């Protein structure tokens, strides 16, 4: 099985331009025989930090925009994951769609959404392609134990994590180190491949109004032993892929250290947490 990621720069409000980048990415994926490829968080719509701008470009899964995505990508062999601001009734979600050959296989909505205008997702579906079970978390979700654990418990061998990072310069190095540590832990404790599928900013991000930052990229794929097997170049658009071993199993605990820990200590954890003030 070959998996990959397109590290690209999306433009706020340019749905057609962003979609054409998806098409070009899928052309590259098919050329390199990539089976599943990821695109960044909120890629189709851009990821503004202001509610009215987010709503302006958002769309529903049954909208003309989604039909356009399905139509223009139906000729490609690769399955893919792409983010967008999703309208669900009056609510707004940070969502990633999973698509193959013109069919929407499903979606995942960010469970740790920190923009106040985004609702929190609470479903953790897994998907199957060519015999591989995989799941999706989005950006900051990878910093928490349970989302990836829930996917691994359902048989996921790969966890794709589309990102949108635009980091203030003062916190850049700390963010870089913290994120890599989180992702290494998720891969090792669950015996999964973890894909950090970041964006990149080729200039000032027009969608971010609150601060000046750097969208440095640094996408990578970590194997179940914590090794980065492939990494993108920073500060530029890029395409990465690698072959993975889908037969990897936990020969120590049998269920992965994360799940074993939850089974052994989960009740005790809840007992202690109930005693804590607040």
Image (cartoon, grey):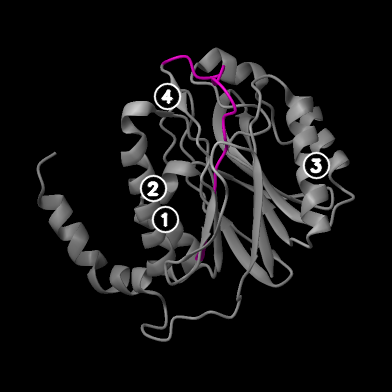
In this view, 264 is above or below 87: below
Mark 1 touching mark 2, by CB under 8 A?
A: yes
Nearer mark to the viewer, of 4 and 1: 1
- Residue 271 in the figure: left or right of residue 244: left
User: Closer to the N terminus: mark 2 or mark 4?
Assistant: 4
User: Closer to the N terminus: mark 4 or mark 1?
Assistant: 4
User: Closer to the N terminus: mark 1 or mark 3?
Assistant: 3
Query: Which residue is at 42% across, 42% downward?
Result: 140
User: Closer to the N terminus: mark 3 or mark 4?
Assistant: 3
Mark 3 touching mark 4, by CB under 8 A?
A: no
Tell me the distance, in whole angstroms, between the alpha carbons under discs 3 and 2: 28 Å
Provide the residue designation for mark 2.
179
Numbered badge on residue 24: 3
Nearer mark to the viewer, of 3 and 4: 3
SS assignment at label 1: helix
Provide the residue designation for mark 4.
116
Tell me the distance, in whole angstroms, between the alpha carbons under discs 1 and 2: 6 Å
């Amino acid at each position: 099985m070959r998996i990959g990621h397109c590290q690209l720069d999306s433009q706020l409000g340019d749905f057609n331009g962003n979609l054409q980048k998806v098409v070009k990415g899928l052309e590259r994926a098919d050329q390199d025989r990539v089976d599943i490829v990821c695109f960044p968080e909120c890629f189709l719509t851009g990821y503004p930090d202001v509610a009215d701008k987010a709503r302006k470009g958002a769309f529903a899964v049954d909208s003309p925009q989604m039909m356009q995505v399905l139509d223009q990508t139906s000729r490609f062999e690769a399955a893919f994951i792409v983010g967008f601001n999703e309208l669900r009734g009056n609510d707004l979600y940070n969502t990633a769609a999973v698509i193959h050959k013109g069919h929407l296989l499903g979606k995942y909505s960010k469970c740790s959404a920190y923009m106040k205008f985004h609702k929190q997702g609470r479903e953790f579906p897994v998907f199957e392609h060519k015999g591989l079970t995989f799941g999706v978390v989005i950006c900051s979700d990878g910093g928490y134990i349970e989302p990836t654990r829930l996917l691994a418990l359902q048989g996921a061998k790969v966890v794709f994590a589309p990102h949108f990072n635009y980091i203030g310069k003062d916190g850049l190095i700390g963010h870089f180190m913290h994120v890599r540590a989180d992702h290494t832990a998720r891969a090792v404790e669950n015996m999964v491949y973890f894909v950090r599928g970041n964006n990149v900013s080729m200039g000032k991000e027009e969608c971010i109004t609150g601060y000046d930052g750097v969208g440095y990229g640094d996408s990578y794929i970590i194997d179940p032993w914590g090794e980065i097997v492939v990494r993108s170049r920073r500060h530029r658009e890029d395409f990465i892929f690698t072959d993975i071993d889908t037969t990897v199993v936990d020969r120590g605990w049998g269920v992965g250290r994360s799940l074993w820990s939850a089974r052994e200590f989960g009740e005790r954890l809840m007992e202690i947490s109930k005693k804590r003030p607040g």
